[in-house]
């Protein structure tokens, strides 16, 4: 498998610093204030999907591509010891402001999830909700997650679904027509950013090659009614086909 030159890291950093932080930042407070953990586009409750371990007390966790770090804040409230890493200074600035406002403190690291400045076996849980799971090269960040995790450690990540990637155009809402080939699907280049979505077979082989055992793959259905719509993913579409999915895997050991 060949990979890109890494140009996506700088392109995505600019996207989040210059564009996305402006609209994503104002959402941070709502996410930080949530009493129940909710995931992804459709605010799927943790009670429905059981993304996290039953007990988080003392769990060493790293959020790969943490953005405004609300997932790390959820983990910290539950007794975990999280670290958040993100490539965007603007996103981390919002995260630090939220730490001050909510009185929750944990390390925030400026860097990318493909090369994390922590040693081998440093964490028990690696997690990514539309962070590294979408914005980093999976052939780089998943081996890095495996390196960071102790034997028996858990990897959890959420991303757009493969079907969504096959049906979404470069601009505009997702279609009911297949618009690109599944064979060779890896990298989706837009004008201002780069995203990565591997087909299920390739993802399974990659995870296994890094020592992971896949425990679950949860395909999310939009609720009725949905709390909101999205320009790229209307709720009506996402009630019929999964627009996003959650992977749960454990490192052998």
Image (cartoon, rainbow, N blue to C red):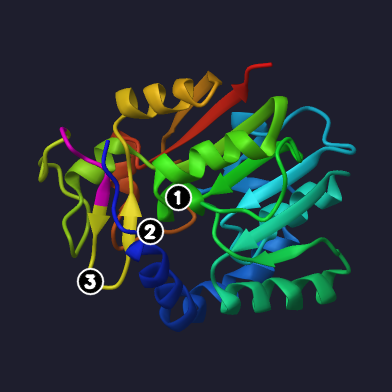
* Above or below 1: residue 118: below
For residue 194, above or below residue 118: below
Residue 51 in the image: state x and y as whole percent: 63, 33
The residue closer to the viewer here, 199 or 55, is 199
Magenta highlight on residue 52:
no
Tell which tag, 3 or 2, sits nearer the viewer: 3
Mark 3 Cα shell of 10 Å, populated few (<14), some (14-19), many (≥20): few
Image coordinates for residue 134, horizontal then vertical, percent: 42, 50
Tag 1 or tag 3, which sits nearer the N-term? 3
Tell whether position 186 is magenta. yes
Residue 204, percent across and down? 40, 23
Q: Secondary structure beneath disc 1?
A: loop
Work out how far the residue at label 3 is from the one at label 2, CA to CA, in angstroms.
23 Å
Where does the image place residue 131, in percent across and percent down from the top left?
51, 54
Residue located beneath label 1 in the image: 226
Mark 3 highlights which residue?
Answer: 191
Is there a contact, CB below 8 Å, between mark 1 and mark 2? yes
Q: Secondary structure at mark 2?
A: loop
* Numbered label attached to residue 229: 2
**235, 252: nearer the viewer:** 252
In the rendered view of the protein, which quadrant contains the N terminus?
Answer: top left
Which residues lie in the magenta part? 183-187
Q: Is residue 171 left or right of residue 80?
A: left
Front residue of this view, candidates 53 and 31: 53
Nearest the viewer among 221 and 61 is 61
Are the residues tagged 3 and 1 within 8 Å (C-beta)? no
Q: Would you call the spot at circle 1 few (<14 residues within 10 Å), some (14-19), or many (20 or more)?
A: some
Mark pair 3, 1: CA separation: 29 Å
């Amino acid at each position: 498998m060949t990979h890109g030159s890494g140009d996506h890291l700088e392109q995505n950093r600019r996207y989040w610093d210059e564009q996305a932080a402006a609209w994503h930042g104002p959402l941070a407070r709502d996410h930080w204030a949530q009493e129940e953990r909710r995931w992804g586009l459709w605010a799927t409750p943790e009670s429905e999907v059981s993304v996290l371990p039953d007990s988080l007390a003392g769990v060493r966790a790293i959020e790969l591509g943490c953005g405004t770090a609300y997932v790390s804040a959820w983990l910290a409230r539950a007794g975990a010891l999280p670290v958040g890493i993100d490539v965007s200074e603007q996103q981390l600035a919002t995260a630090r402001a939220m730490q001050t406002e909510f009185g929750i403190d944990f390390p925030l690291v400026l860097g990318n999830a493909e090369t994390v400045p922590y040693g081998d076996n440093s964490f028990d849980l690696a997690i990514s909700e539309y962070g590294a799971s979408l914005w980093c090269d999976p052939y780089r960040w998943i081996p890095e997650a495996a390196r960071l995790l102790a034997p028996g450690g858990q990897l959890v990540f959420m991303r757009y679904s493969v079907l969504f990637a096959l049906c979404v155009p470069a601009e505009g809402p997702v279609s009911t027509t297949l618009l690109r080939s599944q064979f060779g699907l890896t990298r989706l280049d837009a004008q201002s950013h780069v995203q990565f979505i591997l087909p299920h077979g390739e993802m399974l082989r990659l995870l296994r090659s890094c020592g992971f055992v896949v425990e679950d793959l949860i395909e999310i259905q939009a609720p009725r009614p949905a709390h909101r719509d999205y320009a790229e993913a209307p709720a009506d579409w996402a009630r019929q086909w999964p627009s996003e999915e959650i992977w749960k895997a454990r490192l052998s050991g």
